Image: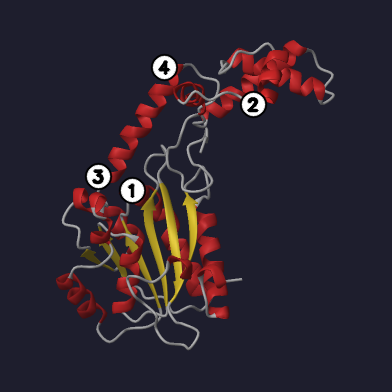
Amino acid sequence: MAVAGNADPMLGYLTTSFRDHQGLRQQNQAALTPAMQKWQSENSLRSGAGDINRVATLYARYAKAGGDSRSESALETEGIQKMDALRERGLDIAGDESASQARVDRIYEHARRALFARLEEGVITDACGSHVRVRSGAVDRDEYVAHPAAGERVREDDAATLLRAAGRRHGGIRVVVSDGLNADAINEHLRALLPPLRRMLSTDGHDVHQTVTVIENGRVRAGYHVAGLLEADGLIHVIGERPGTGLNTVSAYVTYGRDTDGRLRWDPQLDHSCTTAVCGIHPQGKPPVKAAEEIARTVGRMFEQRRSGVTLR
């Protein structure tokens, strides 16, 4: 995939750069289509051309062809301003090779920091209030990254701690917070996301447990494990995700806990199609307060329809 921005429309992971296409074509002895070759020739462009002045010229020609009556010089100036604004937002467009490589290096360093970051206790206390910390089966971040299944269940001794903390209070909606692949995202956005979400759910009359489960080295399926242990009717799992984009983004996985016969269906192997995901939560994407509103609406629909995931309407 060739996505110039920080977050692609599917997973948000760093993918093939636009500027790599010419080199990849040459390595594989591939060629442009005849239509593209003709277009480049008509516009006096060499294959792979992409500096800001050439792109500004194309912008002006495109605008002129669409009926814009301004001078070509004015349109080129506007084109340069638009590209500067896009690059300021992180898009890899019309820059030189050194600037592009520096951007990739920054994203790589950001990804490493995100992968090995730790949840900050102050953030957890401020955003969650009452909480119980548990660990997945991954003993450290290296195992968490190398062996994904290790992060999908809570350790047995921590599961016992969780059950003791819950006492006889099972059922209802459980809120789980995990570091996931990007604890920095949780550290940045949880304070802005979780308190308003809990207020909205309470106002709507939902039975939300006050004690939040916080999982170290947790993956999405670890939330299913916690919900199963506590026999939850519903789960909201807030998790840090998407390292490799240059952004710290959070996702919330919202799951209804019962099957069509009303039986609890929790299992660490529960199919992800049973879950509704609210993704891309960060100030430059879906702002945390807006995300809280969307999650609250999703929970409302989920309990009205008694379903979640692909069957939720």
Which three-letter amino acid code belongs to the residue tagged 3? Phe
The residue mark sitting in front, 2 or 3, is 2
Look at 26% across and 60% down and name the residue there: 151
| First in residue order: circle 4 vs circle 3 | 4
Label placed on residue 33:
2
On the image, the x and y values in percent for residue 238 come to 39, 60
Where does label 4 land, which residue?
A: 98
| Quarter of the view holding residue 158 | bottom left
Where does label 1 land, which residue?
A: 182
Please, what secondary structure does the residue beneath circle 2 have?
Answer: loop
Between 107 and 26, the one nearer to me in the picture: 26
Please, what secondary structure does the residue beneath circle 1 have?
Answer: loop
Tell me the distance, in whole angstroms, between the alpha carbons under discs 1 and 4.
28 Å
Which three-letter amino acid code belongs to the residue tagged 4? Ser
Label placed on residue 116:
3
Tell me the distance, in whole angstroms, between the alpha carbons under discs 4 and 3.
27 Å
On the image, the x and y values in percent for residue 301 come to 57, 73
Look at 33% across and 46% down and name the residue there: 184
